[in-house]
Amino acid sequence: MLATKSISEDIKFTYDDYLLLPDDGKRYEILEGELLMSPSPKHLHQKVLGRIFQLINEYVERQQLGELIIAPFDVVISPHNVVQPDLLFVSNQNIEKIKSTHFEGTPDLIIEILSSSSLQRDRIIKRKIYARFGLPEYWLVHPEKKYLQILRLQAGTLRQVAEFKANEVLTSPVFPGLEIELKQIFSLKI
């Protein structure tokens, strides 16, 4: 009896394949060798992303902690895992991993703004990949439900260690001394 495989089982996309994609304005990622496309983010997503970047970037620059990078910017975790997180933080000790076109390896922090189209991908698939490659901290921001979850790497798994609601103040050891009143993020007028 002959074993049958689907074509997708034999094909694994790599970063080299990714570089051959057309510059068509779409956001592509490779997760475990599978090429995925994401639709354009919604207005609320972009407003929340911009505000988070503004609040954290000001602190990072003032404290000279490293660099905060806003999407789109490729993060090449491995040849078969290329992501475009909404935000990534790179500390000074990893700054040399920033190349002109991408970041090589795992940054110090990844922040994803959740949407209905990305929920499962960000919460399950990327979380497992990030844990496997040693991401120290991962933030999931839900603009519609107005909360932010912090997950930290513990025993090889990204586990939720905190959840902040719109009326609370966000803190994280990644940014010592930074306090963000989440109402500054979640009470945006759209």
Image (tube, rainbow, N blue to C red):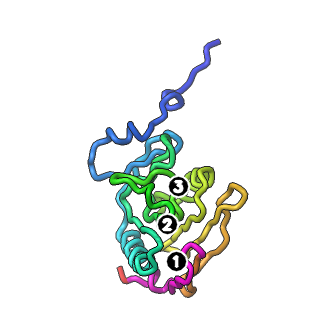
Q: Predominant secondary structure in magenta? A: loop
Please determine whether, in this image, residue 126 is positioned above or below residue 78: below
Which residue is located at x 67 percent, y 63 percent?
A: 159
Label placed on residue 178: none
Residue of label 2: 91
Q: Which residue is mark 3?
A: 106
**53 with respect to 161 (left or right):** left
The residue to which callout 1 is attached is 146
Residue 156 image position (x, y, % from top left):
69, 55
Magenta stretch encompasses residue 10? no
Q: Residues within 10 Å of mark 2 (few under 14, many from 20)?
A: some
- Taking the image as shown, residue 112 lies to the left or right of residue 123, namely left
Is residue 98 visible to the viewer in this orientation of the structure?
yes
Q: Which residues are magenta?
A: 173-188
Residue at 49% from the left image edge and 41% from the top image edge:
80
Q: Quadrant of residue 57?
A: bottom left
Quadrant of the image occupied by residue 67: bottom left
